[in-house]
Image (cartoon, helix red, strand yellow):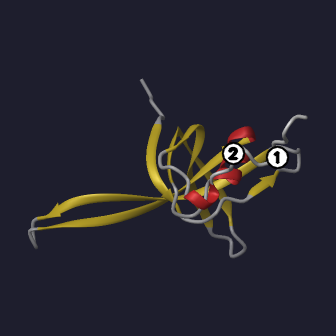
Amino acid sequence: MDLNLVALVGRVCHDPELRETRTGRRLAVLRLALNRTYHDPATGRRQQQATFIDAVLWGSRAEAAARYLRKGREVYVRGYLEASTWTDAQGMKRTTVRVQVEDMDFVDAPPADEVEDPAVGEQELP
């Protein structure tokens, strides 16, 4: 039995940019920093190691990411790994692996200056 399932919690490395394919599908790519803490037996200290991975969001998830996520925000993504292979301008074969996101949740609260005020735009009725 094969299983291609990925669940990650990481911090957004840069503000996501909403793009559109030639066919009109909206997408956003998140670069996530995933930190792993481990004990280094050589030094006896706890160490941190960062891994960076791209996560691709489509449609309404891409729009939500572009609207609400900013550099440094913590996010949960769940999806599957997908590899893409191409030949670069120098004729070298290249491969990249990305997470195709099927589910996303915001882990931390947005900064206070980014919280929308529900009273904005409301008018008093006569």
Residue 36 % position (x, y): 31, 57
Q: Quadrant of the N terminus?
A: top left
**Location of residue 86 (image quadrant):** bottom right
52 vs 35, left or right, is: right
Q: CA distance from mark 1 to mark 2?
A: 21 Å
**Is the residue marked by circle 1 packed among few (<14), some (14-19), or many (20+) residues within 10 Å?**
few
Q: Amino acid at mark 1?
A: Gly
Nearest to the observer: residue 108 or residue 101: 108
In the rendered image, is residue 12 in sight?
Answer: yes
Q: Which residue is mark 1?
A: 121
Q: Amino acid at mark 2?
A: Ala
In the rendered image, is residue 95 in sight?
Answer: no
Q: Which residue is mark 2?
A: 64
Residue 18 % position (x, y): 75, 55
Above or below 51: residue 77 = above
Above or below 123: residue 49 = below
Question: Which residue is situated farthest in the front direction here?
Answer: 126
Q: Quadrant of the C terminus?
A: top right
SS for callout 1: loop
Question: Residue at the spot x=84%, y=39% of the render?
Answer: 124
